[in-house]
Amino acid sequence: MRALHRLTPLAKCLIVGVTVCCVAGGLYFAGLFDDILPGSNGSETNVTSSVSGEQSSTSTATGTGSAPIQAPADRTIRISLDEWVGWKNLLDANGGLRTQPGSIYYNLGLDIEFVIINDADHSSSALIAGSIDGAGYTINRYAFLFDQFVENGLNPVYIGTLYASTGGDGVIAREQFASIESLYGQRIGVARFSEAMALMDWLIAQSSLTNEQKATMRNDLVMFDSPDDAARAFFAGHLEAAVTWQPYLSQAQEAPGTHLLFCTTHATNLITGGLVFDYGFVQANEDLLVNLMQGAIDAKDMYLVELSVIRASMPMFSLESDASIIEMAGDATLLTARDMRDSIQGIDQLLFAEMADIWAYRGEQANRANADIAFTNRIVNRLELEQIDVLAQPVGPAFTEEERGQVRDQAEQGHRIASLLTMRADIRFEPNTAVILQDGSFSAIESFVDTATLINGSIILIEGNVANIAGDADNTPFAVQLSYERAREVARQMQLRGIDPNRMVIAGNGIENQIASNDTEDGRILNRRTDVSFIIME
């Protein structure tokens, strides 16, 4: 969740200076683009194949294992970043905002200037004007900006994810609110048009609330200028919940009467960030961008050690202690080359599509179909993959059998289990069987899979339910078995789509959890539903 308004006075001065420099240098760089970027006028726009099987260019250069690739003479590559610890490896590789002698990028023959711009509107305007060559964005923000870039003549592509928020962003709430559904009708604070707002919108959209309730809840969100302001209002007693970031997440865990309802520790695929360039620039400078990404990966050993560079480069860190910077660094995880390849081939596109839906709901021009053309894997496919030490890899389930057993026992005893959110769907089966009908039911399963992929740190409870059509108690044993088999088939379909079976717990409720009258078909549909709950283990 990036800070669009979290600015110190020094940062504001820096932004004013950067803006003046961008305007003064705009014509120069715009002209330079015409010389070095053949096809940047949109003549090469088809990148649909870039995410599925795109081959790298005919260049023979590789990453750090090859001779350094020299930047064009007198040509500095300019990239905007906001003040976020997840970009730290770029700064470390560069030795600061401008490439320093002896730095990783210097030794790779790169000449990079990072420009700090906290306002995404300013950075996108600079990218469109040509005063910067690329920019760092969350995929959430990129989905918001994509159509704006295209309308202004750019052919934007995202070249790879550098970091994932792994604890830095989340939802804090009063302790009596244990799920997203329980917050219906409550005051929830978010920063307007930010990753925070989109995060809450997305969680609401996945919930078991009715469409009318979802619309009401999303329209009633209380808007603030920043996640800091939302958190302060929460702790002042004006809100029941707020979407914010550290250090407020930790404060909510320590303060009486409040708790951390959700954070990206349990959803490491939900807020991620990487670099965006015009596709023409990528074509003309592929070797340089390979070294840019490889150098960032090579700087990973400096992440928790070298603290002076980020202090000198980003004003918000200038007065932070070593311990504070290290703690903040723990809220973002750097991706390896292998992670980047895996991510851009699936999760990045999924996240873009999901976030585009959220922005479209808010009336913004965003389209999930753009996920097919918004990414290129031609850079990450050339990165040096790490040697995998099999013995060093995590072994066993993501959750202990004891944790899964707790969920299973409560489900079997009919207890309502506290879950972050619950999704409900009518998955149609052949009568009295667990055979799924080909009538759109699989689209519901795909929705379960998408949510499970993004909330990847949750236990998944899959509950089957059947309608009590006969109203006969003697039917209960068969109903329980049938509902269990149907839940198991949904779990199997989710596993076939990549969800770890060790995350899943299966339960059959039979006719015990009727939520509507069986006198109408609509009521019977609600009663024969499949419930999928995402449970966060403390």
Image (spheres, rainbow, N blue to C red):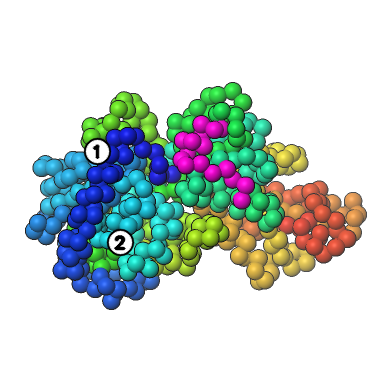
507 magenta-colored: no
Q: Is residue 177 left or right of residue 371?
A: right
x and y, in percent, of residue 21 in the image: 21, 50
Residue shown at 28% from the left, 76% from the top = 43
Instruction: Give the residue type at disc 2.
Output: Ile
Residue shown at 37% from the left, 30% from the top = 327
**On the image, numbered disc 1 is attached to which residue?**
313
Front residue of 108 and 112: 112
* Circle 1 Cα neighbour tier, 10 Å, few/some/many (<14 / 14–19 / ≥20): many
x and y, in percent, of residue 178 in the image: 64, 37
Quarter of the image containing the C terminus? top right
x and y, in percent, of residue 84 in the image: 35, 41
Instruction: Give the residue type at disc 1.
Output: Ser
* Element at label 2: helix
- Outermost residue on the bottom side: it is 43
Query: Is residue 179 something one can see in this rendering?
Result: no
Residue 255, compared with residue 107, is above or below; it is above
**On the image, numbered disc 2 is attached to which residue?**
128
- Contact, CB < 8 Å: mark 1 with mark 2? no
Residue shown at 27% from the left, 49% from the top = 19
Q: Is residue 211 left or right of residue 520?
A: left
Range of residues picked out in magenta? 219-234
x and y, in percent, of residue 37 in the image: 20, 68
Q: Tell me how many marks there are.
A: 2
Residue 82, compared with residue 526, is above or below; it is above
